[in-house]
Image (tube, rainbow, N blue to C red):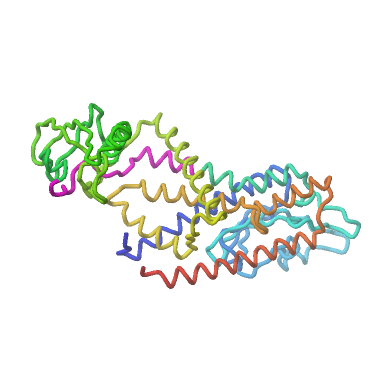
Amino acid sequence: MTLTNPWFLLAAIPVFGLCVLIHELGHFLTAKWAGIRVEEFGLGLPPRVLGFRKRDRGGWEVVWFGGPRTAEDAYDGEQLSRLNGTEKHPEQHHTIYSINLLPIGGFVRMPGENGEVNDEHGNYDPGSFASKTAGKRIIVLVAGVTMNVILAMVLFIFAYGVGQPVAAPQVGSVVKNSPAAAAGLRPGDTFIEVNGQPVHQFSDVQDITDALIGQQSSACKKDPKCTVAITAVIRHAGQKSTVTTVIHARVDPPQGQGPMGIVSTSNVVLIRYPFWEAPIRGVGETFSVTGQFISTIGQIITGRTQAQISGPVGIVKFTGEVAQSIPVEGWWPILSLTAILNINLAIVNILPFPALDGGRVFLILIELLRGGKRLKPELEGMINLAGMAILLALMVIITVSDVLHWSS
């Protein structure tokens, strides 16, 4: 797939934005539930470009680039002039909702994320992340990846509902002197049934044929020319009536020809599923893709396969390529891609690596194994800072690689 119109690259903005928004929304909602003070809910990474925050006296204020982050700084000169020596202004706990300059992530900023204390006596700020029980902290940390998985299910359900683009059960080309050629098949012919089973896409023809060959393969071990009779109902190109023909598919075909000696057409058809079936398929697809990701990570760790990683630039390019296929293939490609990116984000974030959600959960589990004794805030902060530095370095390396291979 080649990107022919660079405007389709803009599709990455809503795709990335949705993935990040739903992830951070999970952290935000559970933090509010747990009684944690959320200081900022940001899309993108700082510096901040624009933010909004409620005022104590009502309405909203705009927090511009370089604007105040603390409650104390949020008061303007006119408000401060009304305060006398005995009067204290009310403490604000209103969240800043911000859009930040670097569009490569998001964050929910809470006090005490690295176990910091509030005073010299070691007392936790009651509204901080650190003051909450281990269970509540784990719930807040895993809420982001949970929301990503739920969104992936919803997107796959919608994708199956609007229609899955598949290769039509149609012959694109016929190999000379192949079983299909001997049976009279021609380019443009359409399969209606194979061995009494209706077919809706080209893969149905392949699956039925492979299943029949599998049943006969043990009986054909000593005969390399062994064939399996396939009864197919065909509609020839340009005709309305159908004919039934027998194709003697080869059990051991020449490489690249397939059992019948046919190649699928490039024509695409949309398969729409009923409203009751789409949720089942959507949830099943989510578990299937998740299992494939986990299996791939296991193979990379054990060295059985080589890691193939794309960073933000590579994903933007691929998203643009997928988006430009919408006029031909419908909404399935972009919906399923967004679902896959959500699953990818969830799995990566739950890995027990410092600075990631999974790394923070791992530190809480260590705390529980130590009988509730926490790591020193300084140590926890250094661990997460080191992890963030490694992640940023990897992102830079991957981004440079993506840029260098942009045209490939």
Residue 160 on the magenta span: yes
Question: Where does residue 300 sit, x and y in percent of width and height?
Answer: 53, 55
Picture quadrant where residue 1 is located: bottom left
The residue lying furthest to the top in this view is 196
Q: Is residue 267 above or below residue 312?
A: above
Picture quadrant where residue 62 is located: bottom right
The residue lying furthest to the right in this view is 121
Q: Residue at x 51, y 43 (%)?
A: 291
Question: Where does residue 205 sit, x and y in percent of width and height?
Answer: 26, 37
Question: Where does residue 195 sit, x and y in percent of width and height?
Answer: 23, 29
Q: Residue at x 46, y 49 (%)?
A: 340
| Foreground residue among 148 and 343 | 343
- Which contiguous range is marked in magenta? 152-177
Question: Where does residue 94 sit, x and y in percent of width and height?
Answer: 69, 54
| Foreground residue among 289 and 207 | 207
Q: Is residue 240 above or below residue 365?
A: above
Residue 155 on the magenta span: yes
| Foreground residue among 407 and 72 | 407
Picture quadrant where residue 138 is located: top right
The residue lying furthest to the front in this view is 222
Q: Is residue 141 above or below residue 89?
A: above
Left or right, residue 378 beside residue 262:
right
Total numbered labels = 0
Quadrant in which the C terminus is drawn: bottom left
